[in-house]
Structure formats: structure tokens, C-alpha cells
Image: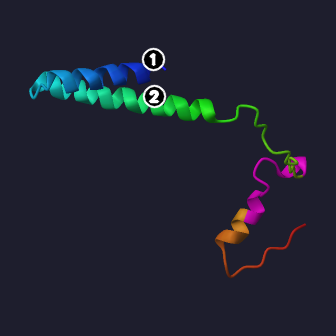
Amino acid sequence: MVAALGALALLVTLVVWRRQDLLGVALALLCVLLTMVAGVSVSAAGQDDDQEPGDRPIVAGPPELMPYGIDADTLEALDQPGRVACGA
């Protein structure tokens, strides 16, 4: 709310003063910045904060294959495309 009021005050100041120098440009840029801050804050306030993450089941593999689910023999077999790996 403060950013919106600040942007409005700067806009009125720019219209009344009609400055066309460095100060006018700085005021215009500050007005744009405050307008963007006000827009983002209004957008954030409009979002629902009650959203909970979806109830997805956690998929876990066997502990001996965690965390990647692949062992060194499998990686070696993948590196040699002409060779078929036999698990023991």
C-alpha cells in the first residue's frame, strides 16, 4: 500500500512540476520502480497461502541400491555396449 501511494505521489509530482532534466528522469524511474513493487505485493497478497503440497507417495527402492538405484557393475556394462552383463 505504501509503494502504491508513493508511486501516486511521484506521478502527481511529475505532472505538476513538468521537469525534463535529470531529476525528472530519476523521479520517473522511481515511480516505475514503486509501481512494480506495488504490483508484485498485490499479486503476492492475492495468492492463496493455504496451499499444501500434493499428497504424493514417496517412492523408495531397496536400501542397497539407494541413493542412485544403480551399482558399479551396471555402469560398467553400460560403458561396454557390445558386452552383455550377467548378474550374479
Q: Is residue 79 or residue 10 the one in the foreground?
A: 10
Image quadrant in which you'd find residue 83: bottom right
Q: Is residue 54 or residue 20 the one in the foreground?
A: 20
Tell me the amino acid under the disc marked 1.
Val
Task: Name the secondary structure under disc 1.
Answer: helix
Q: Is residue 74 or residue 9 the one in the foreground?
A: 9
The residues bearing labels 1 and 2 have C-alpha atoms spaced at a distance of 8 Å
Residue 21 included in the magenta stretch of the image: no
Image quadrant in which you'd find residue 47: top right
Residue 64 is marked as none
Task: Name the secondary structure under disc 2.
Answer: helix
Q: Which residues are drawn in magenta?
A: 62-74
Q: Name the residue located 43 percent from the left edge and 28 percent from the top edge.
A: 37
Q: What x and y, as percent, mark residue 17?
A: 15, 21
Image quadrant for the C terminus?
Answer: bottom right
Q: What x and y, as percent, mark residue 6?
A: 37, 19
| Above or below, comparing residue 58 to residue 73 in the picture | above
Residue designated by label 1: 2
Residue 38 is marked as 2
Q: What x and y, as percent, mark residue 58?
A: 86, 47
| Above or below, comparing residue 67 to residue 40 in the picture | below
